[in-house]
């Protein structure tokens, strides 16, 4: 099919996704053209995606609409990561040369919109584990769970994913891990950011790639593609949320809920008609919320067709390309069923959903996501505070290093707005706060603003 491909979209790789590129073995100046140089593919349009785990499904949605509109005839989506090889080479002192200076026209979408504000970063948010952990704490509090109970819940849900990975020949970690191991802090499953342990987090030291070919039914027939290989996109949705500090309830995600609802409506399906699922699982809260909104039992129902990001592997922005490829294979075997893929980007910031089946849709139209975004934009604005104040804790996390906390922060609300504030783990006042961190959500804290940063100075009530 190489000669027929007139559009190629590449998922942005990890080094090109960082604010400060990490390229110890040389820079690839133009990754899409460098890859195409090694193939017989010469598309007239080449795209390099923005940053985000939503991008594979978002790309399928975008290019499906382009195909339907006659803007292209055959498209390919591809991505891959070799972080495992990179880390192994560095650990063992190998000198490699991965540089490439190939040139050529590319629609480079850059890194996209910022996923965190300066206010959020200054006061404690940052790397994915420390930001997602606060949302996990808010979800834990809403469910009335202790940290131990949350870990047991996450361990049980993720054990099912691990079993799927154990049976997947493409998994980076094809070994079933049981619920007790996944729920228990240990040397092999150490705390990262409360309540998260190591195996609750996407594992990025992988060597994985995947690709998808998209076309129309007419073109597939013209090219002689057997109909037994055809899988259709029935409905889809793409929804972006506000920055984490601007969301009304940190224990929920309007973006996930709205994207799922819109994709089901576009497919004219109900949740119970979907047999197969793959929910992005960089952290437990994403599949937990997706299951909640769809009315699934996260302990029993299928949440992944690959094994999920902690066990199948987390190849940067490209994971959901693997999920879609695996879903296609599943639906070719189970041709009367439907499958749903939820791809997540940022800090539950960008959600893309696709619903698939080997059965053709009764009709297909380009989707308009404006109604979902109207819901997002119509929410009340939340003022962010930089001042001395008292506020009630909504969420928090303690960040762990080797043997001791290295940082902590809270997200809290009062009648004036929301405040994010660090806890200085070196201060005498922090000892008591961290000792009682388990019960922080719902308690009032005193916050002091100094030198441009908010700090928690004490808890004021139970």
Image (tube, grey):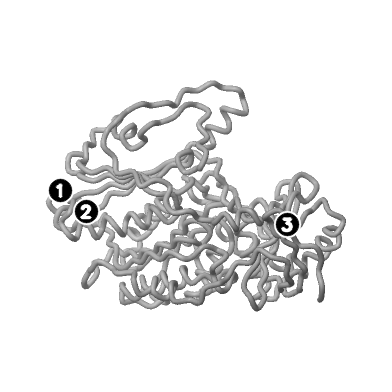
Quadrant of the image occupied by residue 61: bottom left
Instruction: Check disc 2: other Cα within 10 Å, few if <14, some if 14-19, many if 20+.
Output: many
Label 3 vs label 1, nearer the camera: 3
Secondary structure, mark 3, is strand
What residue sits right under mark 2 in the picture?
Answer: 215
Secondary structure, mark 1, is helix
Left/right placement of residue 384 relative to residue 376 reads: right
Left/right placement of residue 81 relative to residue 187 reads: left
Residue 385 image position (x, y, % from top left): 64, 66
Residue at (72%, 68%) from the top-left corner? 149
Label 2 vs label 3, nearer the camera: 3
Instruction: Check disc 3: other Cα within 10 Å, few if <14, some if 14-19, many if 20+.
Output: few
Examine the rendering and report whether any part of residue 215 can be seen: yes
In the image, residue 423 sits, relative to residue 33, either above or below, namely below
Asked if disc 2 and disc 3 are in contact, CB closer than 8 Å, the reply is no
Residue 256 image position (x, y, % from top left): 47, 68
Residue 454 image position (x, y, % from top left): 70, 60
Q: CA distance from mark 3 to mark 1?
A: 67 Å
Quadrant position of the C terminus in the picture: bottom right
Pick whichever, 442 or 198, lies toward us. 442
Left/right placement of residue 264 relative to residue 387 reads: left
Asked if disc 1 and disc 2 are in contact, CB closer than 8 Å, the reply is yes
What residue sits right under mark 3 in the picture?
Answer: 450
Residue 388 image position (x, y, % from top left): 73, 66
Residue at (58%, 53%) from the top-left corner? 128
Q: CA distance from mark 1 to mark 2?
A: 10 Å
In the rendered image, the residue lying farthest to the left is: 222
């Amino acid at each position: 099919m190489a000669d027929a491909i007139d559009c190629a979209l590449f998922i942005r790789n990890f080094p090109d996704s960082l604010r400060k590129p990490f390229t110890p073995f040389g820079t690839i100046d133009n990754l899409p053209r460098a890859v195409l140089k090694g193939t017989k593919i010469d598309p007239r349009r080449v795209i390099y995606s923005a940053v985000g785990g939503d991008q594979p499904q978002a790309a399928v949605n975008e290019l499906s609409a382009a195909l339907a509109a006659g803007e292209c005839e055959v498209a390919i989506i591809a991505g891959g990561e070799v972080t495992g090889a990179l880390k192994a080479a560095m650990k063992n002192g190998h000198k490699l040369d991965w540089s490439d200076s190939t040139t050529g026209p590319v629609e480079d979408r850059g890194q996209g919109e910022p996923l965190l504000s300066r206010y959020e970063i200054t006061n404690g948010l940052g790397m994915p584990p420390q930001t997602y952990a606060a949302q996990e704490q808010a979800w834990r509090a809403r469910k009335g769970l202790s940290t131990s109970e949350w870990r047991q819940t996450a361990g049980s849900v993720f054990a099912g994913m691990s079993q799927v990975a154990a049976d997947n020949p493409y998994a980076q970690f094809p070994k079933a891990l049981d619920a007790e191991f996944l729920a228990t802090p240990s040397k092999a499953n150490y705390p990262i950011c409360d309540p998260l342990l190591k195996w609750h987090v996407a594992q990025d030291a992988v060597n994985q790639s995947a690709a998808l070919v998209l076309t129309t039914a007419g073109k597939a027939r013209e090219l002689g593609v057997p109909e037994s290989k055809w899988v259709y996109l029935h409905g889809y949705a793409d929804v972006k949320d506000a920055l984490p500090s601007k969301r009304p309830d940190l224990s929920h995600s309007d973006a996930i809920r709205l994207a799922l609802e819109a994709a089901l409506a576009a497919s004219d399906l109900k949740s119970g008609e979907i047999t197969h699922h793959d929910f992005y699982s960089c952290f437990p809260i994403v599949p937990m919320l997706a299951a909640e909104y769809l009315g699934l039992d996260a302990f029993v129902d299928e949440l992944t067709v690959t094994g999920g990001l902690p066990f199948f592997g987390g190849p940067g922005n490209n994971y959901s390309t693997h999920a879609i490829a695996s879903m296609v294979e599943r639906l070719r075997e189970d041709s009367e069923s439907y499958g749903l893929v939820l791809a997540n980007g940022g800090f539950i910031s960008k959600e893309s959903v696709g619903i698939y089946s080997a059965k053709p849709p009764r009709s297909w139209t380009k989707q308009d996501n404006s109604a979902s975004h109207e819901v997002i934009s119509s929410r009340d604005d939340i003022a962010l505070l930089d001042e001395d104040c008292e506020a009630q804790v909504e969420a928090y996390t303690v960040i762990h290093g080797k043997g001791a906390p290295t940082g902590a922060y809270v997200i809290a609300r009062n009648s004036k707005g929301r405040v994010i504030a660090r806890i200085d783990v070196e201060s005498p006042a922090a000892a008591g706060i961290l000792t009682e961190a388990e019960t922080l959500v719902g308690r009032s804290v005193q916050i002091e603003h100094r030198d441009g940063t908010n700090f928690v100075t004490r808890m004021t009530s139970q």
